[in-house]
Amino acid sequence: MSLRFKASSRTLLQHPWHLLLTILGVALGVAITVALDLAIESSREAFRVSTETVTGRSTHQVLGGPTGLPDTLPAILRVEGGLREVAPVLEGWAVHTDDQGRPLRLLGIDPLAEAAFRPFLAGGPAADADGTLLMARAGSVFLGRELADRLQVDTGDPLPLVVAGRSATLSVVGVLAPEDDWSRQGLRDLLVVDVSEAQELLDEEGRLHRIDLILPDDGGPELEARIEALLPPGARLEPAGARDATMAQMTRAFDLNLTALSLLGLVFGVFLIYNTMTFSVVRRRRLLGTLRALGVTRSQVVRGILLEALVLGVAGAVLGVLLGTVLGRGLVQLVTRTINDLYFVVSVEGLDLPVAVLLRGGLLGVAAAVLASLPPAREAAGVSPREALTRSTVESRVRRLVPVAAVAGGLLLALGGILLGFTERSLGAAFAGLFAILLGMALVVPAASVAILRLLRPVLRRGIGILGAMAARGVETSLSRTAPALAALVIAVSVTVGLGVMIQSFRGSVVQWLDVTLQADVYVSPPGTVSARAEGRLPAGLDRQARELEGVRGVSTYRGTEFLTQWGMTRLVALGLDPAGESGLDLLGRIGPPGEVLEAFRDGEVLLVSEPMAFRHGIEPGDTLRIPGDVGTLALPVGAVFRDFGSDMSTIMVGRVAYDRHWDDPDLTSLGLFLEGGVHPDTIAEALRALAGGESPLQVRSNLELRELTMEVFDRTFEVTRVLRLLAFLVAFVGVLSALMALQLERVRELGVLRANGMTPRQTWGLVTAQTGLMGLVAGLLALPAGLLLAWVMIHVVNRRSFGWTLELDAGGALLWQSLVLALLGALLAGIYPSWRMSRTSPAEALREE
Amino acid sequence: MTSNAGPSRHAPWALLFLGLLVVGLVVWALRLSGGGEPEGVRATLSAAQAIAGGDTAGFARATEVRDYVFPRDHGPHPEYRTEWWYLTGNLEDEDGRPWGFQVTFFRNSVTPDVPERRSAWSTNQTWMAHFALVDIDAGRHVHGERFSRGAAGLAGGQAEPFRVWLEDWELAGGEEEFFPLRLRATHGEASMDLRLEEGHPMVRQGDRGLSQKGPDPGNASHYLTWPRMPVEGRVQMGDRDVRVTGQGWMDREWSTSALGEEHVGWDWFSIQLDDGRNLMFFELRRDDGLPDPLNHGSVSGPGGLVRTLGAGDVEIQVLDTWASPLDGAEYPSGWQVEIPSEGLSFQVTPRLRDQEMNTSFRYWEGAVLVEGDSSEGPVSGVGYVELTGYGEDAGTRESAPGSGMAPG
């Protein structure tokens, strides 16, 4: 035993680079999953902490419709409803003047009502924060110790902010220092102001966003009914957290997509580990043979290899977890930026490092290392004292396995097809199917490669001569090494192709959609503080004033609000559609000709629902939707489903007429201005800004600018995908590199023979290069259809089920041949070093093994 | 295979490649991220500082005898920091069962100036109210407190027609006249709806209504008392819903004063003797245990005559103590009181031992029975006693309303 370990550890120590390569292999695989997991978890956790801290100990919440709640409601609930724990909340977002990238949650509260809900917010002498000062002094703000330190302010200091596009300098009247971790985390991005301050900062006088309640346990449905009777129309009583849970749900599909990508990263990691462990066995075949000759048993050899894998796995996992946390820091920014752009604002302060995630990643790495070492360990056990026999034995066994693998792969592909074809909405099934297809493809690759090589062999013989044929044969005869490398390369390239085609298709569809949708020449909105979504409201009467401007021939008005409905968080859009902008609605399913539908829409006789909403809730044109309004309930048939790549949130569009019938909300979120020919957008922008005055800054964008901004957001959204695509490919590339090195290492003697028979180093180099290039070519050829299949699945199944969008598959352009080149180059690059080394091996040395 | 046949001689660049990959990833990650570590922190909150004091600068002070003008002075005086409408009383239901009640509306100006804001929630006024109802025979003392801002319909006060309220706890006058007052409040299973007549005319405490609480000028309050108000109405506790009659006591006091640093609390007595006399006196308890020369009180009625009691006129001896079940804090619970100038010598006994107000600042406020002798013969009566500075916050009144408050 001890001899074996000594031999084993000495070999490892004598080849520290190999040791490191193996560890790095594990580390990279682990790092990718850990990084993504951390990024997702951190953004979720940040959302959870900030919402739950803010939800506090409330049991229920009163939520409003589009216009929020009247701020007289708390008094009604207390006096008439006899409720004691009633806390008004008004929320918004602000940024520090010097740190505009990091959104701060502006929370307007009543300090005197807070004690039972969020005691840490109410202040107190020990916290150096007097809640009543917050109330009584205009412009006062509390913030947490951490945030205060980060912004380098303390009690008494001014805090320059930008809120709702306006500068506002508040004064820090207290620094909160809660004892428990939970509250402290919740305070990390929180600015606490009095509800009156929030109303004025956010331009929401007379309104509240919600009212938190703590209802007694014994209240039951009667109490709830009594409260509901006091609520204005459109307001609803919900269990605490219902809204936040619904919001958290919104990113589920997005998160799941990221998780799937991280799993893909791990698959490549496992492959990497498999290769490095195989390489390590191959390299020591002689040593293992010697050990076997000395009486070491097979099971001892297996155990030894597995133990080695375990040790390396642990080392790699530790390194991977460390690397993953570093990577995660970058990824979390990408992930949260996307969530901010698409869903809701969440501010992540650094990375959470939940032990569970780190452990899971680490264990996954160790398990993968041990599992991936099983085949090489078995191979090592098969090393007989007479080692020479083994190679061919292994190869013939592998060759017999090729058709078996192909059949298994075919079955997996079929299974994938069934999973995709026979489920309708399950995203889990979609990903399971996708992975089945990926694995199936990997298993089919060897057989397909053999077939392609056999087809190519005559061509190669004619074209390049004997060396070409030898190269092709070489790939086939050492399938035990080439097959995994090929499979990895095919998967890596097909995933690259698939993701590339998907992004390209998506982008194309969005561009097309923008062409249709962005009809107006100038768009006006209040300046967004933290995200690309339209928020806030325009100065009253701006639409009328804009209509009267010279050079403006039409104005469409837009009012968007988000609130909780039976369909979850829903965006309700009131559209005052100008005739000039009629073609701007991209209608999919509809109940009649577009002209009629739009007329009915404008007259408030039908409403429109977004494609994601229609998909998710099975809403068909002609169905009637009901939304409780301030005045009566809006009940209209669905006139059409409209395409909406702006968001996968459920969106309902109603004509302004219908909206005004049911809601007392004259506000506007944005305007679309149609200009007379020859009028420059800038002229209008200036005129509008003058109309709004300095008090209300406006964001005025030309059609082109808005289009660019939208595409910027789009590209940002896919940045994570792109990075992962690159990472996956890099990991696969490193895998191929080590596979080829193992392969070439084993062929030292074969090449030695060739060299001894007169092959020049240059020819040797050529042979090896041809072989790797051939592998790249084969992989590339196989990866194209595989990649397109993946793209198809991702576009029509995964994306549809995740977000509800239909996209046009667009595989045109440079993408496909680029991928082919990528595969070829990848293989060639990976082959450079092994072939260079082989060509330098002196025949005598290579043959000394005899 | 020997080691020199292995790739170890040349292979570092494979490692280099991987190393660069790792470094690249790390750099990329760092470029996108910031940093920030949490740190350890300390403790928080006391809810009670809602009504707490602070700086007196900018507030009006009670520096001289005030020309009271009614009904204006029934309403709030936001230019002073602290103000209250303090009602207590001993009642009896139709079965002769004794009850006690206390309802107090405290008003506090957080800052001297009203913030200039458009919001309906904007105010510098906070209100606190305390509620207590005692079913003496059942030994039940139900009490509670509320806070609200003086805005958005939550709490407030006005002189004409008179009304102070905190949510649905309300003390209101008539449409035309201040009296009769109607007091309505519910807390949990206890509620009261009482009508209070003026009864004995208003008494100006201290020097014609200027009650000195500290040695410095301005450390005083405007202090008015209605010491014997006929009460009738209903009280309810649990299943018991009864008509009651009795005698109430109302203190009206506003000030911007803080007690002296040396004061750790006070004992305040309001007593209605059955011979028609009403007594009020308080003792400021000093940290050095010496009697405070500012202690004072008054004797009023019958017939509206008012005599001031000075520091040396009242001698109080504690006969018994009671330990709070909350934390064992020890309160006096029974006194021997001598007022030779009035020819009075009597014992004051709590009608229920536990009438501790476990509110955000703790104190004992309870109905008492009086039994003793006057120069005319045996005398008895009822009253209310307030004891502060014995509970958890003893000696540190910074967080108590008392920093703006004084006995009365």
Image: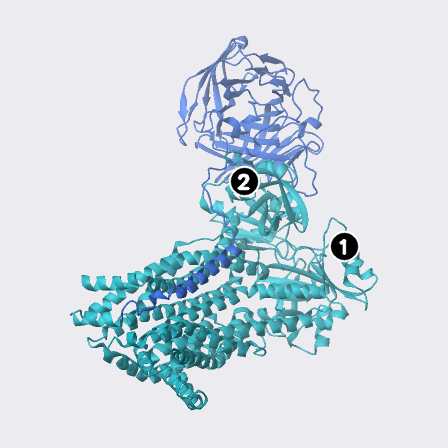
Chain colours: A cyan, B blue
Quarter occupied by residue A27: bottom left
Residue bearing the label numbered 2 = A122
- Image height check: is A650 above or below A494? above
Residue bearing the label numbered 1 = A689
Q: Is residue A322 left or right of residue A548?
A: left
Disc 1: CA contacts within 10 A as few (<14), some (14-19) or many (>=20): some
Secondary structure type for disc 2: loop
- Image height check: is B268 above or below A375? above
Q: Is residue B255 left or right of residue A248?
A: right
Q: Which mark is residue B93?
A: none
- Image height check: is A470 above or below A741? below
Q: Residue B197, image x and y in percent? A: 63, 27
Task: Name which residue type carries label 1.
Answer: Arg
The residue marked by circle 1 belongs to what chain?
A
The residue marked by circle 2 belongs to what chain?
A
Callout in the foreground (2, 1): 1
Q: Residue A801, image x and y in percent? A: 52, 71
Task: Name which residue type carries label 2.
Answer: Ala
Residue at 72% from the left image edge and 55% from the top image edge: A698
User: Do discs 2 and 1 share a chain?
Assistant: yes
Q: Residue A44, image x and y in percent? A: 49, 57
Residue A59 visible to an observer of this rendering: no
Secondary structure type for disc 1: helix
> Which one is earlier in the sequence, the residue at label 2 or at label 1?
2
Q: Is residue B295 left or right of residue B173?
A: left
Q: Which quadrant would the C terminus of chain A be assigned to in this image? A: bottom left
